[in-house]
Amino acid sequence: MVKITLLKIEDDLLKIENLNELLFQDFNLDTVDYNPDTSLDADQIFALYNFSKTNYCLDILKQVSVNSLDYNLYDNTQHFNPNYLINVDTDTSIFFFQKISNALLKPKRILHLSDSRTKYEKIDSGKSLSIKEFPDAVYKKSEDILYFKTLNGLQKIFPSIDELYRDATDEEVSEFLKLDMIKCHENFSVSKVKTMNRKRIAQLHDKFKKYSKDDKQTLKIYLQKFSPELSFEDDKFKISNDQDLKSFIYGVDQRYYETEIGSEKRIANSIIVIK
């Protein structure tokens, strides 16, 4: 069983010598298609399918196999400022990723207690790396799926992956505010739209374009039922501030619902599409 551990330092992947073991364990969690509007439970993990076809898949993941002879060794004389670590199980073609922050490279003072001896050790900054209990991402080549708990910080490993949850551009926000169902207050403009609503607009912009004329009429009735605080005049919703915009966006995304028993009105803060 061959295990390889690589460090990404600047533009190079360097092999750590004499480390032939898995640093992480495989997991048994329920998979959920990635959706920025989904909040995971402890027993769930996001999945990105057909990952090798994406623009942010790393070259090493596209190789038929990983050969340790293809990588130069890391030695202690080199500057130690790694971006991330890859732990590879070459038998199963499973890649475990851990991003590396300055917090993981801080100096440590360790007291080892054992039956044979007690040892105190001081490790200077940059000479040790803390390994997390769970990796930041796992790629299974046989499935072509990338698994992860949070997208936050993964662009350090996979450049541009944050496009999955990007902010809408000023142009896209401006276009959204000009929808035929919206009338903006004169004091509310593109510059007043905050980050979270920009992210929501980026996700929903194309969805709204697909709505038919009848769909839009249904949305108007739906929004008036669940968001009566939104002013509705001349067949348009008046948007005066960022909170009004959030309420409108939640309506477009059909986040509001009513319970079958008790008719309690609620907002879905997390969404998982049932297939």
Image: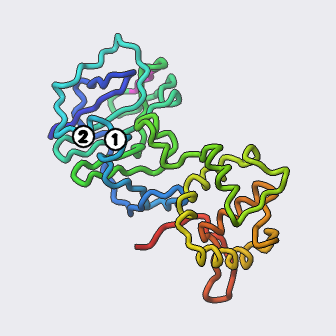
Percent across and percent down for residue 55 are: 37, 41
Q: Which mark is residue 57?
A: 1
**Is there CB contact under 8 Å for labels 2 and 1?**
yes
Residue at 16 percent of width and 31 percent of height: 67
* Quarter placement of the N terminus: top left
Percent across and percent down for residue 220 are: 69, 75
Q: Residue furthest bottom?
A: 261
Query: Please, what is the three-letter code of the amino acid marked with disc 2?
Result: Lys
Q: Secondary structure at mark 2?
A: helix
Task: Work out whether 104 lies above or below 211.
Answer: above
Query: Please, what is the three-letter code of the amino acid marked with disc 1?
Result: Cys
Residue at 18 percent of width and 25 percent of height: 70
Give the CA distance from mark 2 to mark 1. 8 Å
**Mark 2 closeness class: few <14, some 14–19, many ≥20 residues within 10 Å:** some
User: Which scheme is used to colour this image of the protein?
Assistant: rainbow
235 or 150: nearer the eye? 235
Magenta span of residues? 118-122
Task: Work out whether 70 lies above or below 155.
Answer: above
Using residue 193 as the reference point, say whether residue 149 is left or right of it. left
Q: Which mark is residue 117?
A: none
Quick check: is 84 in the magenta stretch? no
Q: Label 2: which residue? A: 62
